[in-house]
Amino acid sequence: MISLKNPKVIRTFLILVALHSFVVGINLISFPSEWMQQFGFNAITENFFKVQGGIFHVVMTIAYLLGAWKPVEHRIMIIFAIIAKFLATIFLITYFFISGSTIVILLSAISDFTMAIILLFLNLKLAPSK
């Protein structure tokens, strides 16, 4: 049985979080704007903000991988990831209720909240740095 204090556990989870962020980012960058309507969004006439959101997710991928690289030594990156996921949750929930937006926004909020809680739990279990 793998101990939750083992850095490999949080490393593996952070790699999965990074993979999720990377896939979201690449999809935002490469999806044709017309496809976004299939997810319940209004027609996009300017791609700049969609692509900017994609690049942001790719940058966050790098941040998550830095935390995964050496979780004990780079614990601040894990804390950064936790904060990022909680802030994303707050933004998405707020946006969902204010704009009356699509279910994809609510599902994204639930996903980010779940990742934040798991990261918080694993960070608390991680062996302290020396």
Image (cartoon, rainbow, N blue to C red):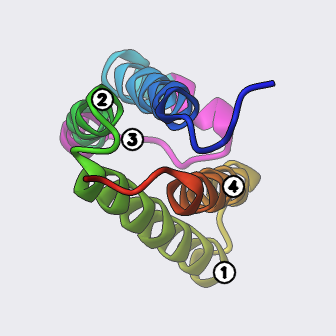
- Indicate the amino acid at tag 3: Ile
Q: Is residue 43 above or below residue 68?
A: below
Q: Which residue is mark 2?
A: 65
Mark sitting on residue 97: 1
As for residue 48 lying within the magenta part, the answer is: yes
Q: Which residue is mark 3?
A: 44
Relative image position of residue 114 (x, y in whole percent): 69, 55
Secondary structure found at label 3: loop
Secondary structure found at label 4: helix
Along the polypeptide, which appears first: circle 3 or circle 1? 3
Q: Nearer the viewer, mark 3 or mark 1?
A: 1
Distance of label 4 from label 1 (alpha carbons): 19 Å
Q: Is residue 42 above or below residue 15?
A: below
Distance of label 3 from label 1 (alpha carbons): 21 Å
Distance of label 2 from label 3 (alpha carbons): 31 Å
Mark 1: few/some/many CA within 10 Å (<14, 14-19, 20+): few
> What are the residue bounds of the magenta stretch?
35-52
Along the polypeptide, which appears first: circle 2 or circle 4? 2
- Indicate the amino acid at tag 4: Thr
Q: Which residue is mark 4?
A: 114
Mark 2: few/some/many CA within 10 Å (<14, 14-19, 20+): many
Along the polypeptide, which appears first: circle 2 or circle 3? 3
- Indicate the amino acid at tag 1: Phe
45 vs 3, nearest the viewer: 3
Along the polypeptide, which appears first: circle 4 or circle 1? 1
Residue 36 appears left or right of 18: right
Relative image position of residue 56 (x, y in whole percent): 23, 42
- Indicate the amino acid at tag 2: Leu
Identify the residue at horizontal 55%, vertical 35% (top origin).
Answer: 6
